Amino acid sequence: MSVRRVMGTEVEYGISVAGQPQANPMVASSQVVNAYASSTLKARRARWDFEEESPLRDARGFDMSRQVADPSQLTDEDLGLANVILTNGARLYVDHAHPEFSCPEVTNPLDVVRWDKAGEQVMLDASRAAARLPGNPQIHLYKNNTDNKGVSYGAHENFLMRRSTAFADIVKHLTPFFVSRQVFAGAGRVGIGQERPKHGFQISQRADFFEVEVGLETTLKRPIINTRDEPHADPEKYRRLHVILGDANLAEISTYLKVGSTSLVLAMIEDGYITRDLSVDGPVSSLRAVSHDPSLKTLITLKDGRKLTGVQLQMEYLDLAKKFVEERYGSDADYQTKDVLERWESVLDRLERDPMECAGELDWVAKYKLLLGYRDRDGLEWDDPKLHLIDLQYADIRPEKGLYHRLVRAGRIQRLMTDDLVEKAMHEPPSDTRAYFRGRCLEKYSENVAAASWDSVIFDLPGRESLQRVPTIDPLRGTKKHVGGLLDSSDTAVDLFNRLTGS
Amino acid sequence: MAQEQKQPKKSSETEESVETAPETDVNERKEALDSDVDDILDEIDDVLETNAEDFVKSFIQKGGQ
């Protein structure tokens, strides 16, 4: 009933090998992941355990046949691509043709920001480790979502929800929210359209790559609401909402508001609190129309006939969320819930007045302000390669080259984290989810962990012929409170296993 | 820059507030803003990749999710 719930992000990074535009991106991605693994792992490398994966399970209640699925949808087949499970509970691996960082399960928006940022630092270290390999491949990584030549790659969010919530309610109430959420969560893009984009600036990296309202696909015919039903938790109790529409954000406040506001809207949907119908006429075209207008004045038509801007549509959700939290908690609401509501309101008010007032908080505004500065000073048009370069280089994760990083260092973009908190999160798991158990096991007993996944840790123990699987089906068990003492006092994996199983 | 920011305003409220702002204040604000933006552009000029056209052309990705 607040911003708190089990959640996380998974980000595919853009990858380029300096001076070799034709380099095989799968090879380069594997080099990055493997280089990080060799430079950090103490003992054996645990495999990913695919037992609980079901990427073709549809939340609407059926399974897609493996024969009709696009090969890119068969994410549960171990293709031998590089994969490593980190001591912070995250998964670093090669997904399609990109290195991906899936952050450990966390319980609140600030922790999403923290481990999402830790992912950037892991990727940075990984690319630097790759540069030390024989042949010194200079691999550069970008936290963005398109190459502006027709290709897009994702930055997904995951939210654990109650299974009892009807999926149709999620679709109905979440779609208008997602159509308009980009007004603060967009990362900004130079270019309009998919292939051979037209000249111009738009709010979102991803909007032009969405073609349908609801569906299972993630790599083609992308839907605003994705129906993948793979809860990685007790399917009787939970579903995992897999959100594929968002942009990869660098600005911490963009990420914080993106997942914080979404979590609140999901709480209202679960509670049946939204009785107003905010459905939009033509969600896919509205999504693009909002994105294509950085002045934020474009009106979209609601099914009830009203015409609102994207900001005004967000204000409808904000208004509901404020009442919801007030009715349920009053002044007892937790700090982050209050903070998300306050920042959400403040950002929307300023976006309505003059979007430029948010240049110190939001990715798309920061990028837009920079681009307008260049246009003004150098007389550049939107087709100028320099403006396209600025768009790309904003997302370069190297602190010396990345323009986001330069803006932060110049005090022009605010942060919520400290370098120290992010650095710790590269190695330490969150303490309040099962990621704690997974991460600590990998840190302490790595030579005995044969495989792991979101829902299991599999041990290879001396004296036992078969592998021993410890299920972690409940995301809120295996926490520090729950198993911290046990892990501290078990010197070996055998000790731990015996005490866990009572043998 | 100012030209880009001042898209036609649709809400009458915004129009009023723009109209009532004295001309000198707007100019002063614009100048302050310009020098502020110029500082960061100078800094960023130093780190931009040297051949923008080649760099942008060679940033080719394979599909993802």
Image (tube, coloured by chain):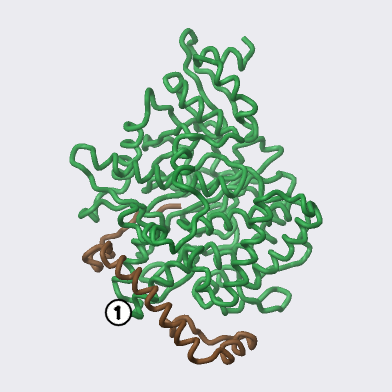
Q: Secondary structure at mark 1?
A: helix
Q: Residue at x 53, y 87 (%)?
A: B8
Q: Amino acid at mark 1?
A: Asp
Q: Position of residue A56 (x, y in %)?
A: 55, 44
Shown in green, the chain is A
Q: State the image quarter where residue A282 is shown.
A: bottom right
Residue positioned 35% across, 80% down in the render:
A376
| A41 sits left or right of A102 in the view | left
- Where residue B31 appears, as percent x and y from the top left, is 41, 82
**Residue B16 seen in this snapshot:** yes
How many labels sit on residues? 1
| Viewport quadrant of the C terminus of chain A | top right
Residue beneath disc 1: A378
- Residue A2 location (% of width, % of height): 70, 50
Report the front residue among A76 and A441.
A441
| Residue A71 makes an appearance in the image | no
Apparent side of residue A365 relative to residue A140 in the rendered image (left or right): right
Q: The chain coloured brown carries which letter?
A: B
The residue shown at (56%, 63%) is A212
Q: In front: A416, or A295?
A: A416
Q: Going by the image, does A14 lie left or right of A216?
A: left
Asked if A49 appears above or below A200 in the picture, the reply is: above
